[in-house]
Image: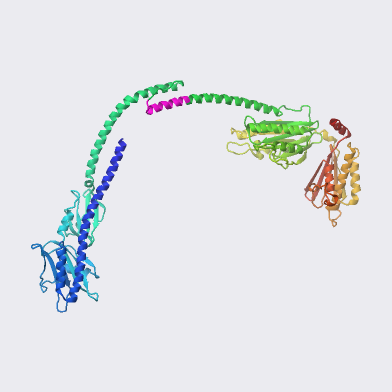
Amino acid sequence: MGFLFLFYSFVTTMNYKRLRLEGIEKTVDIETEKVNRIIAAIERDALSLARDGLLFHKFQSREIIETSALEYLNSFPTVMGGGIWFEPHAYNNETLRTGVYAFYDKESGEVRLDEFEMDEYDYHSEAWYREIVDSIQEPYQVVWTKPYLDDTSFVMVTTAGAGVFDDKGRLIAVSNIDWELDQMVGELLAIKPTENSIVLLCAPEHSLIISSTYSEAERLASLDDIHWDIHAGSFTLDGTYYLTFSRDLDNGWLLSVPIPEKEIFADMERQNNRFSLMIIFSAFLMLCITYIVISKLVNNPIKQLTSDIAQLALGNLDMNINITSKDELGLLGQTFNKMKTDLKNSIEAFAKEHTEKERLSTELNIASDIQAKILPHVFPPFPERKEFNIYALMLPAEEVGGDFYDFFLIDSNTLAVIIADVSGKGVPSALLMAITKTLVKNYASAGHSPEEVFYAVNNTLCENNDSAMFVSAFMGYFNITSGRFVHINAGHNPPLIKKSDGSFKFIETKPGFVLGVMENTNYLEEEILLDCGDTLYLYTDGVTEAMNAGRELFSEERLVEVLNRNINCTPQELLSAVKREINGFTDKAEQTDDITMLALKVEQDTGRNKKHPEKELVVEAKMENIDEVINFISACLTGVNCLPEQLNQIILAAEEIFSNIAKYAYEPSDHLSSAQTTIGISISEEIQLKFEDTGKPFNPVEQDVPNLDEPLEDRKIGGLGIYFVKKFMDKVKYTRTGNKNILVMSKKIITEAQELGQLEEVL
């Protein structure tokens, strides 16, 4: 309420000030307009007399100007006189001075013509006449003289004059209207808005005070007697601050009314003081009434509310706050009751949620145990096998993870190893991990090659994969006897290998597409040889992408460094060393991804001691040397325990390859010493043939397969021999190294006993 009173007082005060200032300005405007109307009438009459003076000159008729002067003064009694005054000899050559003047006789109350003795009245020398003549520059121009005291009536007068010009533009006479200023000045000085306001009428052009209520400035004195800037909007005089209300008159004079600011708003201040006393009294009265009302209607409910809230604070959520009033306290009581109910429900919901979280946590712990147990976790896993040592671990980022590893014996001579990373984390990844692991082991155990395993697993995972999850994986078959490690990569990190006489290096492998995204994807098998003392290290990206508090990655460089610092460790010691290094690097930073590692070390090489040494034959690439090549291969295969049809297939494939080299690898102009072919053969569990030549680059593996269903006459020439080579041999691989074409073919040896065993299994 007090604020409203203050606001009302402020608005009222501002409006009063505005209206007060507008009232003063309007008063000054009205008085100025009155004077301007008189000035305009005088100037109009001066011009009219000038026009009649011209007629007076033309017709040499004194009656014309006398009649005009009398009529003008009768119609405009405000002025005291007016007439026409000619320049020397301007009226005619015989007359020096000619003039007509009419004036208002105050005693008789009539307008009469003044009878001047022109020989005695030298008006040409009068100040008013000279001022008018000197100021007039053109016809219809009206000039005003500086106010002066009339030497006959002793009243303050100003004269308005206009020029009379002949046909040649010469000034021949002037008209004049004499205006007595005392009445006008008295009316202006009477407009004082306040007791100590000042009214000043002056002629700035002449630096002349016409009249003023300022005690130190006399009339017709110099403006230098004024102690303030007459053009300023405000000023301070003798310690009093004045606001100035000024208007310019049409004849160049200035009407200025400076008023003390305090006097302008004195009434308003008195009114504000009364209003302030009323506000203070009203506020005191309202305060007393409010105190009584609050004491009676608010204090008791507040005490009750405080007591009830204290009970709530002690945990009594079954009580209600009993305040039934419709005011804010009643609303506050309802709010506390609702808050109590919500708090009670929230506590019950929290207890239920906590129970549910504990149940989920228990289930996740069980799931984590199950996941840990479906991975091989007993080491050594094959204590009876001394040829190799293997160790693996998986550290999930959450309760369950999406990474997995596995290893198992497909047969007594083949160890399968796999490591994989499922996209995402948590339960969905763990489920897909379990499915993928099961699929891989089932397909591999059924005797499929790594390429066939990934092809089948990929198609199975692509079925109904609405969540668009995928798996990156690396898998290899280790032939324990021969040391051959046939591997395949589905978008996974390449493993590292340490040869017995070297350090850890990344295996050069071509990663295929990840599993579970695109159906019917083919995957490329690659092969390396593991010797005694070699160590193979497989990992997921959780190792190299482990992050410390500064968001720095562990990186492949750090991984290679820590592996080479522990180059002679067992697989278990090697993985433990890597894990310690990761823990030290990440410090207390949260693990963001699953960490999975597997290490395989070859301990014995007994099986490969049975391997036949590799034999080579170097011949010129000519068709007449084909018998020498066939005889060389047949001799090398003598005594090998394999099926006869296998030997025939190998010889036919070798004959086709050598024929192609002899016919197409070299140009006829090539020197015989450069047109050579090297044939190498090695025998272990499989028979491997290697052809090397320095001829034109040619990859027979990439040749199109001929369409055997087309009629013979429609088939394209060529390609059939290479087709049969691929059919006869298990593997055909081509590389271009430097300037050499290198083609390697291999076929697994099957004995008659093995064939008989397979037949019995089928039956």
Q: Residue furthest bottom?
A: 94
Q: Quadrant of residue 417?
A: top right
Q: Which colour scheme is used?
A: rainbow
Residue 660 in sight in this render: yes
Quadrant housing residue 363: top right
Vertical relation: 238 (above or below) 149: above
User: Which residue is at the front of the view, 109 or 729?
Assistant: 109
Front position in the image: 611 or 103:
103
Q: Which portion, as a residue range, is magenta? A: 325-341
- Which quarter of the picture shows residue 16? top left
Quadrant placement of the N terminus: top left
In this rendering, would 659 be left or right of 384? Answer: right
The reply to whether residue 229 is in sight is: no
- The x and y percentages for residue 323 are 39, 24
Question: Which secondary structure type mostly characterizes the magenta part of the structure?
Answer: helix
Residue that appears at 30% across and 36% down: 2
Q: Can you say which quadrant of the picture contains the C terminus? A: top right
Q: Let me know if residue 64 is in the magenta part.
A: no
Q: Position of residue 405 (x, y in %)?
A: 70, 32
In the rendered view, would you say 626 is above or below 403? below
Q: In the displayed structure, does residue 687 sit left or right of residue 556? A: right
Residues 655 and 255: in front is 255
Residue 326 part of the magenta segment: yes
Q: Residue at x 22, y 68 (%)?
A: 135
